[in-house]
Image (cartoon, coloured by chain):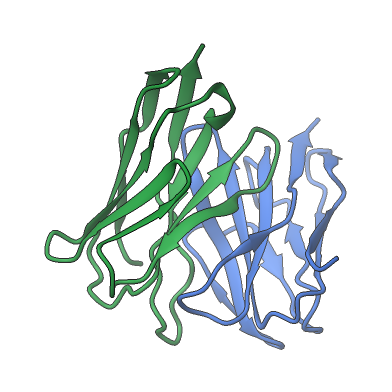
Amino acid sequence: QQQVKQSPQSLIVQKGGISIINCAYENTAFDYFPWYQQFPGKGPALLIAIRPDVSEKKEGRFTISFNKSAKQFSLHIMDSQPGDSATYFCAPAANQAGTALIFGKGTTLSVSS
Amino acid sequence: DGGITQSPKYLFRKEGQNVTLSCEQNLNHDAMYWYRQDPGQGLRLIYYSQIVNDFQKGDIAEGYSVSREKKESFPLTVTSAQKNPTAFYLCASTEFIGNTEAFFGQGTRLTVV
């Protein structure tokens, strides 16, 4: 299976601070780079995703930065809020037959008020 | 509303007993997946299916079985061969195998009693 390495494993940020989560991958065929957000006891849901034709995408306080040469992409949460406290997963994917959907191990974010 | 329905939300299994977790989707998606989530382990892939009557083993398939007789249904059986089945189980679907958004159910929490 393709390797996906997510860091850090956990993150504590003060309210109003910036949260940064990184995802490194090996498969150069990946062409879809999403971040999923999961609250305790719930299933994950897509937060934001990027295609490789752009290097950055912003939706409100959430930004994805993509570095094709380094084979990594990052999630930036600006003005972090207690409601952002959740687990975040990256799951890069490719349009390749036979490939399954593989997730990073997750980052648990706690935003203190 | 379109989505994925998992049932039951909570399930208790006795030692040596097989149990089946239900997953139904009305999104008309071709691909469906089962994941196991343990604290600090992220989402680990058990089985996935690209199309009806076809499925593939994931990273931790031992002690589990699946079927895909209908497009909308992908039940997971946890057999007595699975020695440590206590976990949170998540079902997901995508329109096709590849670079597209994954939709998740709300999960089933299985506990061995």
- Percent x, y for residue B17? 82, 48
| Residue shown at 34% from the left, 74% from the top | A31
Q: Which chain is blue?
A: B
Q: How many marks?
A: 0
- Quadrant for residue A16, please give it: top left
- Percent x, y for residue A11? 37, 25
| Residue shown at 87% from the left, 48% from the top | B8
Identify the colour of chain A in the image: green
Residue A105 visible? The answer is no
Q: Quick check: B89 left or right of B96?
A: right
Q: Quick check: B77 left or right of A65?
A: right
- Quadrant for residue A34, please give it: bottom left
- Quadrant for residue A70, please give it: bottom left
Residue A59 visible? The answer is yes
- Percent x, y for residue A26? 22, 64
Q: Quick check: A58 left or right of B68?
A: left
- Percent x, y for residue B98? 47, 78
For the N terminus of chain B, the image quarter is bottom right
Residue found at the far top of this picture: A113
| Residue shown at 34% from the left, 29% from the top | A18
Give above or below for A9 relative to B53.
above
Which of the two residues, A99 or A76, is positioned nearer the viewer here?
Answer: A76
Which of the two residues, B50 or A31, is positioned nearer the viewer here?
Answer: A31
For the C terminus of chain B, the image quarter is top right
Residue found at the far front of this picture: A60
